[in-house]
Amino acid sequence: MIKTRLIQLRNIMTEIKADVYVIKTADFHQSEYTGVYFNEREFMSGFTGSAGTLVVTKTKSALFTDGRYFIQAQRQLQGTEIELMKLDVTGTPTILEYIDANVSENGCVTFDGRTIEAAWGLELEKTLNKKNATILYAKDYIDIIWTNRPSLSKEPAYILDVKYAGEPVKDKLKRLRSKMTQKDADTHLIATLDDVCWLFNIRGNDVKCNPVVLAFAVITMEEVYLFTDEDKFSDEVKNVLMVDNVMIKSYEDVYSYVEKLEKATILIDTQRINYSMYKKIPATAKTVVVENPTVLMKAVKNNIEVQNLKAAHVKDGVAVTKFLYWLSENMRTKQNVTEISASNYLENRRREQEGFIELSFDTICAYNSNAAMMHYSATAESNAVLEPKGMLLVDSGGQYYEGTTDITRTIALGPVTKQMKKDFTLTLKGMLNLSSAKFLYGCSGMNLDILARGPLWSEGIDYRCGTGHGVGYLLGVHEAPNGFRWKLTPGRNELCVLEDGMVTSNEPGVYIEGSYGIRIENEIVCKKAQKNEYGQFMEFEMLTVAPIDLDLVDTAYLGAIDIERLNKYHRFVYDTLSPYLDDKERLWLKKYTSAV
Amino acid sequence: MIKTRLIQLRNIMTEIKADVYVIKTADFHQSEYTGVYFNEREFMSGFTGSAGTLVVTKTKSALFTDGRYFIQAQRQLQGTEIELMKLDVTGTPTILEYIDANVSENGCVTFDGRTIEAAWGLELEKTLNKKNATILYAKDYIDIIWTNRPSLSKEPAYILDVKYAGEPVKDKLKRLRSKMTQKDADTHLIATLDDVCWLFNIRGNDVKCNPVVLAFAVITMEEVYLFTDEDKFSDEVKNVLMVDNVMIKSYEDVYSYVEKLEKATILIDTQRINYSMYKKIPATAKTVVVENPTVLMKAVKNNIEVQNLKAAHVKDGVAVTKFLYWLSENMRTKQNVTEISASNYLENRRREQEGFIELSFDTICAYNSNAAMMHYSATAESNAVLEPKGMLLVDSGGQYYEGTTDITRTIALGPVTKQMKKDFTLTLKGMLNLSSAKFLYGCSGMNLDILARGPLWSEGIDYRCGTGHGVGYLLGVHEAPNGFRWKLTPGRNELCVLEDGMVTSNEPGVYIEGSYGIRIENEIVCKKAQKNEYGQFMEFEMLTVAPIDLDLVDTAYLGAIDIERLNKYHRFVYDTLSPYLDDKERLWLKKYTSAV
């Protein structure tokens, strides 16, 4: 099947004289996760992971993906001609290098420009200029091959009441326009779906687990346009948007609109608009290329959002605790539970919570060695039966009107080894250490990452990924710009200052290939501590409320301060959750949050 | 006197039609510390600090300096028209902003271009271009006013034997040329004195505490020129340099030499050459503007240098320990000791050590509240008599053939408060914590700074400066690019990766204005730890060998791991130093390094 599709593509490439065809995992909005309409890379390669780029030349093809998906991609590409390219592994060319090696002098690279980030397209232009090669980007040729393609999502949009969003649209627009003025811009193009939804206090259902609406926005000093499928907007929703003079225009018309901005000074984020849109900007227009101001505005949660998030985390903690109790009972009574049935049980506990909308990502429920794969997703074939021994890693989250959650717990299902307990305890120590940090305003995640990683590094262990990511409010579970990382990644704003109201995950772990995986993840919100002659001190508050498995704690690896932190957290967990539990669950929680 | 000098300068300014005259604390080599010939800023302002910029306009004048010198500058500027500008304090303009505000359309800014860093001059050009104003930089007008100016240093240069330097000049040149080739450069101008001395394995005595020779170097693929005062070089030294074909030319001729590089591709570091030299580069020459490759090469000490440094630190530790014993005896018997007499006693103990050359900086010996000034220097007026109570801070170091040392100890002279002990203990905890770090290769000081600062930040205390700086090898006590800092400073390479062989100070502290100051400083060398599937781990080894005052330690603020680290360090100190001490000193050290 893949073979036939690649033949079809190469026939087209010959016709249009293209040396290379590039298919990224992307929609028209630089989304991390995309609707089914956009699964061209999956359609053409058979690889179903959430991230990867397929590059097809006249004679060969390659799929570039990252460490999360090496094993899965290897399996799914088997039997095809497509070579797996392991990104960030020594010896692997970058996608640009690979393209460069496969394009001839005066040659041509083709892709659907709407699915390519402008910044990357501009980088490619630089590379191709040296060979006098060109880019053909105005047409989606895969659409010709993909005859039974699903249609674009038609799910309705809805208003997120200000009691959830915390700030009226008019205030957000005012703040945004003032930032545009600071940058001497009079027009701003927003293509990223979470930025658009945040700005207009709207949500939708166009991407699974991401309650967004497919839309572009254009903000000028006087006008506001939303380019979207008008059918998704009920009269009621339109009436609310009308209050702020938001004018709805057809989704596809954004390109012709941009083409007419001849005298504008346009604020754009080339990492957050697509290449086709960028190329529509008239030569006479000025551009101000900076990060979308909404990125930082959205990351700093307002007081109402933070209060709501706390409520969401209590609901989420209740669901997780009920699940943990059920799991421990089932292990005791040796019931038949699998990774998938456990995931389903947990999902149902979340669905019982008031204000729950959907999961915030596909639950990772991974038993023993499956957990060594950071982003494991159980399939019918891999679905392991849980036995009363070893460890289960469960990384899950929900979308609530009160916000987005993301929590990981690793649980002993029965006897575990001393090494497992040691690794779990060091992970816990790091998680508590970072959560307890106090630091001067001005610190970024880069300054703090070692607080979580240090206890593992001291033992010669690393977890090969960031310690944490920003989390949206009823939006993406991964949100820029805040995070905890120790290395600079090009194009990422690692040095973003931690602001009062930023919500970040804190999730160190240990992953032993073929053996087991451990991750403990709490979300923490940054807030102000004291201000004195040295400056404004900042600290974190735990948002996540769920017990940490004491059966996996070996106090030999904890100092007095670590034990104090663990016991304090467990008192908070018990006090917060116990009113929502039945007697059996409460007794169980009492025991599993008792002081060590 | 200052008044008369400023009148003379303003007369000159009128004559040459200058709006602004700028005098930086600088020689022609961007040195941190300079010879007496270069003290123009001190001559014109009366301020004697090691850092500061005087800006004189037709009607007013301002001295810009940093937090180390606010108190001293305030006092020394008293009675003059010169306004103190506190750098990095909210509301203080930058020097560029101040100049911009005081230069008229088509106006003129004047300075001796040889004393201005090229990068700063180029920034100024940008600012002035907007006003069509110009820079007059070819003449040193202060020289006209300063009639009894000291002459340039005439001190002899000497060869640093390869048994000290660890690498022959020819090997250094080979490595340097390979780095030039990587950057497509065929010529490299080096103006920084430590880089020149490191490259040619020479030392001199042209700057107090900095054993350097005033010289410029030009390296091409075939030739090597040293522009310096030939009289400083004996025939013996010349013969050694001749082996590597180093040709000596007159100091002043470097400018006319650069002027002739019409076809060269010149590697320059605009932060490390002066503006006049930069302006001499012909328009037809190409430039490659990067950090001098010697900066990183010199920072990574080779194995012989590290072994020598360990020997130097033992000598230094013996001197410091003898001093500490003497001090404790004198406090017990209530002898009359002052800050200055204590400094002298310590200096004499260093002078007794074989291979000692000079101090590596003016000793900071600061009693009680004097120690709250980070860079206090006792004068005849301020010189405090030490009493058997409170704390004494002693920050000192030596230049040995085996390398440069820098150590700070804070000592209880008698009864101290609980708060002093708490602050000392938290400082100690931070120092030990950073020194014990294990981390993956790729970390910079920014990743690690919080390990030292964290224990103080947790209590709402900060020390308002970096945690540590690189240290030279028989060169500057402050050396780029490594360091421990948490904030990015423009123009500084904070993200420089910590390499095997880099030597950095680790010196957290607490400074309570008007009350006391605490600093504990050890030098640590970075080295490889294990390499495994996660990558190359790195760790530090303590170079500094001297006891930490147990009378100031309150174990209530230490965890089990901190106590283990302290006792381990003290065992190392006793074992290393005891063979070099007399019986009384040894007994005293035994007690003061006993396990807590």
Image (cartoon, coloured by chain):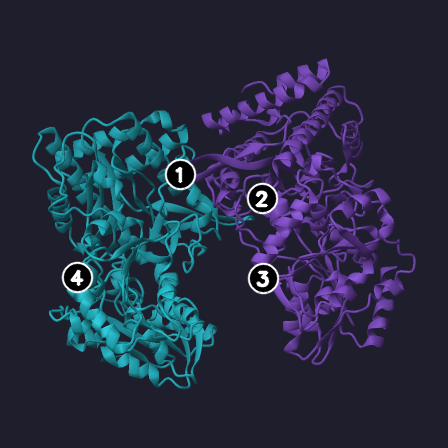
Chain colours: A purple, B cyan
Q: Which chain carries label 2?
A: A
Residue B319 place in picture, x, y as percent: 17, 44
Marks 3 and 1 on same chain: no
User: Of circles 1 and 4, which is in front?
Assistant: 4
Whole-angstrom CA distance, mark 3 to mark 1, is: 47 Å
Q: Which of B542 and A313 is in front in this view?
A: A313
Residue A184: which disc?
Answer: 3
- Marks 3,4: beta carbons within 8 A: no
Residue A335 place in picture, x, y as percent: 79, 23
- Marks 1,4: beta carbons within 8 A: no
Marks 1 and 4 on same chain: yes
Residue B450 place in picture, x, y as percent: 43, 42
Q: Nearer the viewer, residue A520 or A188?
A: A188
Q: In which quarter of the image is the N terminus of chain B?
A: bottom left
Whole-angstrom CA distance, mark 3 to mark 2, is: 43 Å
Q: Residues within 10 Å of mark 4 (few under 14, many from 20)?
A: some
Which amino acid, mark 3?
Asp
User: Of circles 3 and 1, which is in front?
Assistant: 3
